[in-house]
Amino acid sequence: MKGKIIIIGAGFGGLSLAIRLQARGFKVSVFEKNALVGGHAYPLEKDGYKFDMGPSLITAPDIINDIFQSANEQLSDYLELIKLEPFYRIYFHDKSFIDYTDNSELMKTQMRRYNAKDATNYDKFINASKKIYDVVITGGLGATPFMNWGTMLKFIPYALRLNALLPTYSFAKHYFKDFRHRFTFSFHPLFIGGNPFRAPSVYQMIPYLEKEGGVWFSKGGMYSLVKSFEKVFLKLGGEIKPNKPVKEIVLNNTRAVGVKVGDDFYPADAVVSNADFIHTYKDLIKPEYRQKWTDKKLKKTDYSMSAFLLYLGVKKRYHELKHHTLILSKRYKSLIKDIFDKKILPDDFSMYLHVPSKTDPQMAPDGCESMYVLIPVANLAGRVDWEKEGTLFKDKVLAFLEDDFGLTDLRKNLQVCEMFTPLDFEKKQNAYLGSAWGVEPKLTQTAIFRPHNRCSDIEGLYLVGASTHPGAGLPGVMLTARTTENVILNDFKKSRINFSAMGVK
C-alpha cells in the first residue's frame, strides 16, 4: 500500500479520484456528509417518479470511460448510454426554436430560416471551437495542473492565437448576427455556473466537445453513473463512510494528517477535499494555518450563480418538450447582469427543463412525465428572502409554463412538486452562498488564478471538484480528478518514500 488518503465528499469529483487512487495502490476512504453518495447528483424518488437532483446530461463519455479503465473496467459493463437527438430544443421568446444537434446540415438548414450568412459561418465557428478543444482536451490542458507561471506562460500564446481569452459571447458574436444563434453558441458557460459575457472563450471548446462526443443519457438516470462509480470503488477495496460530516481537517504544523468527525480523529497521509472550496478553507481549516487563503481573500473570491429547481411529477405527457428543453426570456445580457451582478430576483426568467421520461419511460409511471425545471438565480450574496419568495416563485413558474408557454392543465395534473432553493444548496450541501457551481469561471479565476489542485498553504492537502482546475460541469469535474491524481502521484514520486513515513501512521 502506497499510503492512506481521505477524500471529503462523495460527489463526482471525489468518487472519480477515489477510483483512480485506489487503483494506483493507495488506501482510500471517502467521508460523505449525507446518507448516500453523489453530492449534487443526489437522487429523488416519489410516487413512482424518479429525478436526478443535479447534473442531468453526459458529454465526453470517453472521459468517463477513462475512469473505468483506470480500474481495468469498461463503462459498457455498467451503464447503458443513450445518445440524444436533438441534444436540446431551444425555445426563444417569440416561440421560434432551434433543435440543437451534431448534424451540421440540419443545423445550417435551421439557421438559414433566420440568417443565411450565419448558416454559412457555422462551419467556421465549429472549426474554431475544435482548435480550442484540441488544446484543452486532445492536448491535455484540462488535465495539466496550473500551479506555476511556467505552465501559464506556455498556455497564453495558444490562448491569444485562438481568441480563447475573449468573453464567450464576444467569440460567438464574431460569427453570428441573429440573436438566436448568438445565444445558441454562447450559453454553455451557464451549464458550469459561468456568465457568458465574462467567462473566457476557452469554454467555447464545449460546442465541439458535444459535436465530437455527443450528448447522452444514462438509462435509469444520472444516479446510475454515481452507483456505478461507487460499485467500482468498493470492488477495488475502497471504503465509503456515509453520514460522516467532516468538521475539521487536522494539521500537524503545516501538514494535513487527517480529519475529525464529531470527536473522532481519522488519520491519513494526505487529505483531498471534494467539498465546497470556501467551506473547506473557512470552516474546516483554522485561520492561523491559512497564509494565502485568508478570510479576507476568500471574501474577494467571486462565486457562481445559484439555481431554483422544481421536481415535477405530471400525469400527462407534453410533446412540445424534448429530453432537454431551454425556454428563454426576451432578455439575455441584462437578465444575466441581474443574476450575476445586481443579484436580484427579476420579474422574468429563462429556464432549462430535463424530462428524462422522454427517453426512459421507467423514470415516471405509465403515461406520465418526470420533469426537472432549473432557473438560474442569484446566489445568496443578494438579498432575496427565499423563505418568503420560494413558494411565490414556484407558483409564478408553474403559471408561466401553463399559461404562457402552453403546457395545458399542468397544475391540474401535478402529482409531485418538490422545490429546491439556494438555501437548500447552502444547508444540505455546504455550498457557500448557495452556489451550485463553486468558484465562478471568469478570466481572473481560470487556470493559475483558480484554486490549485494542490493547496498552496498546507502540505498533503489537495482539492478536487468544480472549484479547482479545470472547473465545473461533469467533464470538467472528472478532469479535475485526473489532474489532482497527477499532482498526488508526482508528489509521491518526488518524495521517493512512502507517504506514511511523512505523517501519522
Image (tube, grey):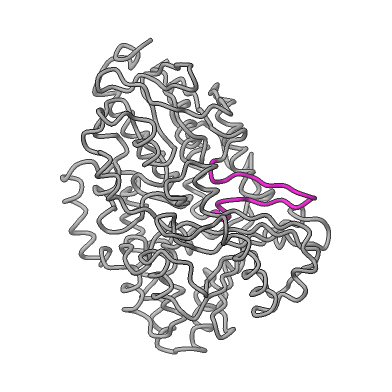
Query: Does the magenta-highlighted stretch encompass residue 53?
Result: yes
Residue 68 percent location from the top left of the image? 53, 37
Span colored in magenta: 39-58
Examine the image and state in which quarter residue 327 appears. Answer: bottom right
The correct choice, above or below, for 438 with respect to 3 in the image is below
**Where's the N terminus, which quadrant?**
top left
Residue 293 percent location from the top left of the image? 26, 39
**Where's the C terminus, which quadrant?**
top left
Instruction: Judge by depth and name the residue closer to the eye, 193 or 245.
Output: 245
Instruction: Judge by depth and name the residue closer to the eye, 288 or 388.
Output: 388
Write the residue at 66% across / 57% down.
311
Residue 273 percent location from the top left of the image? 41, 34
Examine the image and state in which quarter residue 454 appears. Answer: top left
The correct choice, above or below, for 24 with respect to 280 in the image is above
Residue 412 percent location from the top left of the image? 80, 69
Instruction: Judge by depth and name the residue closer to the eye, 283 or 211.
Output: 283
